[in-house]
Amino acid sequence: AFPRDILDCLPPGGPEWVGSFTFHELLVYHMTSPDLIIVWSVGFQTAEDEAVTWREKQKIVYAAQTPPGTKKDTSLLLPSSYCPEYVESSWYQWWEKEGFFRPEQHERLSHRVDQTFALCIPPPNVTGTLHLGHALTVAVEDALVRRRRMQGYRVLWVPGCDHAGIATQTVVERRLLRDGGKRRQDFTRKQFLREVWKWKNETGEEIYHQLRRLGASLDWSRACFTMDPGFSRAVTEAFVRLSDSGLIYRSEALVNWSCALESAISDIEVDSQELSGQTMLSVPGYKDKVEFGTMLTFAYPLEGHDGEVAVSTTRPETMLGDVAVAVHPDDPRYQAVHGKHCRHPFTNRLLPIITDSVVDMELGTGAVKVTPAHDHTDFLLSQRHALPRLTVIGGDGTMTPPCGQWLEGVKRFDARQLVVDALVEKRLFRGKQNHAMTLPVCSRSGDIIEPLLKKQWFVSCEEMAKKAIQVVEDGQLEIIPHHYTKTWKNWLSNISDWCISRQLWWGHQIPAYQVEFPNSTEQWVWGQSEDEARQRAAVKYGVKPEDITLTQGDLPLNLLLTSSTFTITFREFNSHHFPQTTDLQCFYPSSILETGSDLIFFWVARMVMLGTELTGQLPFKQVLLHSLVRDRHGRKMSKSLGNVIDPLDVIHGVSLERLQEKVKEGNLDPRERLVAMEAQRKDFPKGIPQCGTDALRFALCSHKMQGEDISLSISQVLSCRHFCNKMWQTLKFTLGVLGDNTTPVATLGETSALSSLDRWICSRLYSTVAECEQAFETYELHVVTSALYSFWVHSLCDVYMEEAVVHADTEHHVRARQVATSILYHCVSMSLALLSPFMPFITEELWQRLQPFGPGAAAQTPLCLQPYPCSSQLAHWHFPEEERDFQLVQEVMRVARSLRAQCGMTKEKPAMWVVCSPSQAQVLLHFGSAVWTLSRISSLHIYCPHGVDQEELHSIPPPTGSLIGVVDHTCQLHLHIQSGVNIDKRMLLQLSQRRDKIVPKLETILCRVRSPDYLTKVPAHVRQQMDTKVSTDLATVVPLKSSLWQPLMLEAHRCSN
């Protein structure tokens, strides 16, 4: 029944057992008896469903009268099942009111240590709502913070919110236009700012509400808003000091300009849209879509000579600003025109033909138009060749007077077509073709970025960047993951000066003043106040202060400058609140900065540069970068794709109808809206189920955040909700056991394991704690969550609770039951403490209900201030031999249960023979009771073909006609199946389909593995990968084959009887 390629992998031999094979050989018995089927029983994962499937759960509401801020009543009867709404009620208000998250709480901890852990949350924008990227940041940072707090550290986690200059101004402008039909220009600056503050006071707390719903243990008494007076003072001081040191200067240079916003924007606010060719895009301010992704070619006639020079461009409207034509000095096509001139067909200017090695001979015609005022490369060319710079597109996106009356005031992309038509009319147009390109788009407005020449304020970055590189190379600053260190150095080594001014009204106004006195040119001074600036000007220019007129510029500072001073401002804020304390020495510099990897340059690097320059200290000692969150298909989350997920929708649940309403409420293009809504209908046909905060946080932290991007699906979060219910049922069971116990639970130090299974679960807890300790120190939170989940589900629930506690004979093993009860209590209690940093709500709820049964319970103590478990306190529970040996028991249990499931057995308990080696027999005898109970069998027989006297085992060989499963190459299980096995035809069809899918892939891999030069020419690491693939596929296809034949043979055997 097996494909030829698979049978070819078998070594030659007869009907006897052929020994143990490598990964390249099929791990089956080759046997002659027709009624013996060998099943290699393994677990496998099926592909995730196309859409999230779930059933509505019963909602349970916490109805006790609990005033906000008072402790939740846990004396009420524990509900039958887990419900996030019930669990998450009241706890956060109690934590916050009691000040459990404040560093002052440290002095009250009996287990406190003289160490500090401080960090600032990356401030989200005041305009927005949190997305899953924010939720990941909160989940990771809160896990780190809560653990350190439980370890007795003095902990401070500072919340904050960014004023989001462009985004906020845009939102308020839209609101004023919608509500009153007025534009910003209809207000004075002071009036408009009053409207902005009004909006902020109405909606600004929404971000903080969402952070509380995520369970973030922030010290709200120190919350910072980047427009607070204390923050403004720090930003002003930073500008003045940097200007005094010559690091801030005013100059004319090219900037990223949004014509829709009429403002310069930062690099981080520019999205790159990849175009493969001709593409029609919607642009703000244009009724019709605009064409991009094409390269147009036109000719410049040579002056005084016959001939022409053809140039190619993606932006023909900028040709009105051309001041030269550049060619590569080695390009043979243009050797004859070096130093000559072309005549501009519309402005009649002479354009010199210059040579420069920066020109790409393979792009377009090999000759390029030079427009220094509208292209970054051309701007550098103008510096090297002393070329003029002619601005032909204004800040509002219309063509300027130098273009001529026929184009003046015309919008830039309308002018594009007019220029092309004019070139055609003059017979200078030479064609158009598709051209792959990267289009810069303003993330705030959706506008196409226009490089414009503007007088702006800049920060000189070269020297600060060198220092930032050095602190990493010297080990003073650690970047995690470490592979970002190389990227850090490369980017900072090529950094450009940083434009820090914006053409906005909302934001920190630059503390620079233009000096006006008789016969003066443009001169600027700065100061922390206008009076200070006047005094500086008087000294600088040798005039009396009263003769000087100062005018403060309207430009506000780039929000990145204000955000980059966040930790510095946090220091200033604390000095304002605690001037006579050692607060500054405790919390600055902070311990770590944790943020998304996409912010390493735009925010992290600038914080390091400014923090070091302004304070002489690094703002933090470590940088921890997490991956980006994508949807389950691996796509970047985008409103136009309909895959942006609000964390609160995952926490509370949301209907498909409400998801679609949110899309309609946005500002998507109608066609993009249809695409987004269709994607939602496909991915969430019933909406998103209520998963709760704990499940969302645990799911986010379960991904490897220091590797590739995180592809998160709601199904994964839903699985974590099921884990929450597992925890809930475990606690119910434990409370029942404790309630029946007449002897008080012993302390951890007094509890000693009696049975082999007791020693195993104790050692498993020790190993889990040790694994968590190591993983936390390297910030591998996915390892921590995996270890905790595995211990709770696979060790505590699947094994210990079922065997040691449930099946303890109360008359014969009273002492054993008492010990098992104490061990169960400590396993559950310590597991809750271990999980608390990830799942604060459910662990608090369950721990509070468990504590009355423990030794020395404290009534008003929260779990978040309890000591975090450490391996040293469990040293007397470490039994490595028991752990090692019990792995065989768990494999036997897994294979036995898998065989039962394949035959549809639910209540039946067949007899089981284990054919194994002598050493394995000793292990199985040692854990005999557990094997018998956990495998769900009626009797256990152990048979060793070689090396052991069978009379000692009181066993005989297994009967024929058994269902056989392979544990490993020396251990097999034989289940003696009685007649009456149910045959599921649908199961057979599914198995057949899966087999047909896997076998072709396996044949391809095996063909490569069997090639003669495989071992000599294929690198070891590649062979290891191939071994894993072969092992996985073989371990899947063999049970599929056996599973298809075994039911049919059993059915035939039953019919023949």
Image (cartoon, rainbow, N blue to C red):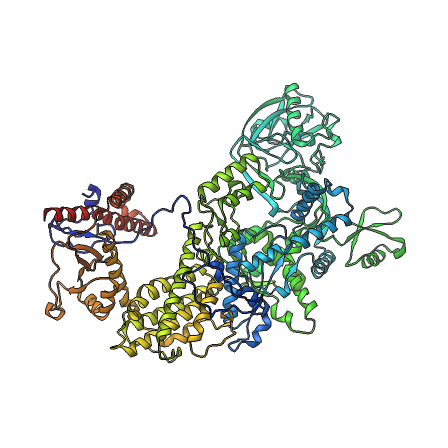
Question: Residue drawn 78% across and 46% down?
Answer: 188
Where 772 sits versus 185, above or below? below
Q: Nearer the viewer, residue 34 or 471?
A: 34
Assign the N terminus to one quadrant of the image: top left
- Give the number of marks: 0
Question: Residue drawn 51% across and 59% down?
Answer: 139
Residue 339 at least partly seen: no
- Where is residue 21? Give x, y as percent: 21, 54
Question: Residue drawn 34% across and 48% down?
Answer: 46
- Where is residue 1052? Give x, y as percent: 14, 46
- Where is residue 612? Give x, y as percent: 63, 61
Q: Nearer the viewer, residue 140 or 429?
A: 140
Left or right: where does residue 378 sit relative to residue 987? right
Left or right: where does residue 812 sit relative to residue 479? left
Residue 346 at least partly seen: yes
Where 217 sits versus 381, above or below? below
